[in-house]
Image (spheres, grey):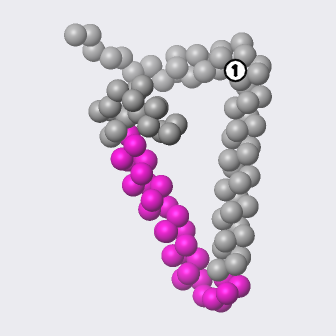
Amino acid sequence: MQSATYRPQSQRLQILEVFKKYPDFRRYYIGLVTSVFGYRMIVDLTLGWLIFDLTHDERYLGYMFVAMAVPTVVLNLLGGVLADKLDPRHLLGAAEG
């Protein structure tokens, strides 16, 4: 069995080459990142504003962010374990519905 060699610099170069070689992918990826970032900013801002407007208490803003962060962390960890243990074809099939 061969040992895996960690090469972060070469992997970064490969990703940059993909961006240079496929402009459609580059546009898609930039649009995706912009969309997700914008959506999260709007949701966080409006929910925080609404909660503070209703309660006038900063504690509830903290509760809101904890309530949003905990499921994200737990489900990401669970998803990572499942991705390591299951066949990728079955996992993708289950995720797509």
Outermost front residue: 97
Whether 4 is drawn above or below 40: the answer is: above
**Amino acid beneath label 1:** Phe
Which quadrant of the rendered structure holds the N terminus? Answer: top left
Find residue 58 and report its image quarter: bottom right
Whether 53 is drawn above or below 87: the answer is: below
Answer left or right for 96 relative to 19: left
Q: How many marks?
A: 1
Within-10-Å neighbours for mark 1: few <14, some 14–19, many 20+:
some
State the residue at coordinates (49%, 68%): 67
Query: Which element type, helix, strand or loop, lies under badge 1?
Result: helix
Answer left or right for 91 relative to 4: right
Find residue 16 and report its image quarter: top right
Whether 34 is drawn above or below 22: the answer is: below
State the residue at coordinates (73%, 25%): 26
Find residue 59 and report its image quarter: bottom right
- Magenta residue check for 63: yes
Whether 87 is drawn above or below 4: the answer is: below
The residue that disc 1 covers is: 19
State the residue at coordinates (46%, 32%): 93
State the residue at coordinates (40%, 43%): 79
Q: Main secondary structure of the magenta part?
A: helix
Point out residue 18 in the picture as x, y percentages from the top left corner: 65, 17
Outermost left residue: 1
Q: Which residues are magenta?
A: 52-80
Point out residue 83 in the picture as x, y percentages from the top left corner: 37, 34
